[in-house]
Amino acid sequence: MLGAGIVGTSIAVHLSKRGLSVALIDRSGPGEGTSYGNAGIIEGNTVFPAAFPSSFAELARIALKRSPVANYHFRHLPRIAPWLLAFRAASQPAWLIETAKVMRPLLARAVAEHEALATEAGAERHLSRRGWLKLYRTDSAFAAQAPELQLAARFGIANVPLDRDGAMALEPALNGEFRHAVHWTGAVSVDNPLALTRAYAARFAALGGLALTGDARSLHRNNAYWRVETASGPVDADDVVVALGPWALDILSALGIKLPLAVKRGYHRHFRPEGNARLSRPVLDTENGYVLAPMEQGIRLTTGVEFAARDAKPTPVQFGRLMPAARALFPLGEPVEPQPWLGARPCFADSRPVISRAPRQRGLWLAFGHGHWGLTLGAVTGRLIAEMMTGASPFCDPKPYTADRFAN
């Protein structure tokens, strides 16, 4: 099992529960990579994925580097342009509806699968069942969400539209810098994603799983087996699962597997609240692209996305663009850390992960590309790929998530 983020660790637990001998290999500790930095929301009630901006005014702000929603590095644009065009095509209304339908089987079970693993791991205290709030500063922004709310009603997804006073009754520390809100009541939030992944890793160890330090780039064929070099020596196996998120293509390209993965970088920083201010649930400022999320470390402020090379130097300029709005919405005090955290989301343009066998490689399995839903879909991905690998009947049709959908 290559990759000890929330996806890889969840897969390792599910495979161990089904009686397989599993080695979980990563160069870092469980949950210390991309899985550490999310907004801590298990979005089982989400409908549409993140989409390409449809507003010309917003695109102009992004182009002029004035928007908190997105930033970019000029030198990266030629490389990312084909992906952005595909992302724009997949963001058309008809395609968004199709994606919502395709992703519903995974999202519908996301909360239940996390709750089951958290119970087994003794980590229930990290889960809060208060939902989350999406705030809208203008009437037009709220009206634009009508198709999502209508589709949510068709899917039977619970939500409660609120006016400003209704939202502030739930979160009194917010001020009146918005006009509308939607309370998505079925979402579960996590107050420490790193601690949750570590708890799943401890559950994996209790099941007899072996966690090793190693570099996944050493993966190669050794006669009939796959081999990975680790600090404890080589490990051979009939099957290997690649759950390496934004590093997956480092391995797969060397094996001749080409997939159109891109990364959306993102930042977060924790802040102490001023006085006795508190949040009970995550809050999204939809028009400024940031989330305020209550964490054990403080209030986590996440930024919008950044299109840049995965390993390029950090450029957290979006904080400067969003801090006035964030501080006007909630009384943020001093930052906890000296510098923001930076991570990279692995994203396919169609907003679907790859959860499948690898093309043309016996015994190689893929589980990555979850985009903004990495935490959300970690546990349910673990169940699905474990069922596929052990010959059980999958709880849903895995065909929409196959790597073969990208074949020319």
Image (cartoon, helix red, strand yellow):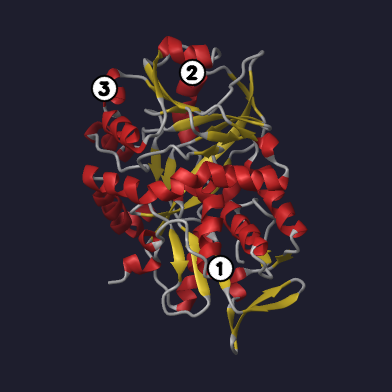
Task: Return the residue at label 3.
Answer: 140
Alpha-carbon neighbours of circle 3 within 10 Å: few (<14), some, or many (≥20)? few
Residue 47 found in image quarter: top left
- Residue 241 bears which disc, if any? 1
Q: What's the mark number on residue 340?
A: none
Q: What element carries label 1?
A: strand
* Quarter assignment of residue 161: top left
- Answer left or right for 301 relative to 23: left
Relative horizontal placement of residue 11, taking residue 249 as reference (left or right): right
Where in the figure is residue 86, as x and y percent of width and height? Answer: 28, 55
Disc marking residue 329 = 2
Q: Position of residue 49 (x, y in %)?
A: 37, 43
Residue 330 visible to an observer of this rendering? yes
Amino acid type, callout 3 = Ser
- Residue farthest front in this picture: 393
Inspect the image, locate mark 1, and give the three-letter code of the amino acid beneath it: Val
Residue 214 percent location from the top left of the image: 68, 68
What is the CA distance from the residue labelled 3 to the residue labelled 1? 45 Å
What kind of residue is marked 2? Leu
Q: Earlier in the sequence, mark 3 or mark 2?
A: 3
Q: Distance between the residues labelled 3 and 2?
A: 19 Å
Q: How many marks?
A: 3
Q: Which residue is drawn at 59% across and 38% down?
A: 340
Say few, some or many: other residues with alpha carbon within 10 Å of mark 1 (under 14 / 14 to 19 / 20 or more).
Answer: many
User: Mark 3 or 2, which is nearer the eye?
Assistant: 3
Please tell me whether mark 3 or mark 1 is closer to you in this view.
1
Q: Which residue is drawn at 63% across and 16% down?
A: 274
Evaluate if marks 1 and 2 touch, with contact meaning CB atoms under 8 Å apart.
Answer: no
Residue name at image x 61 percent, y 42 percent: 115
Q: Badge 2: few (under 14), some or many (20 or more) residues near its Cα, within 10 Å?
A: some
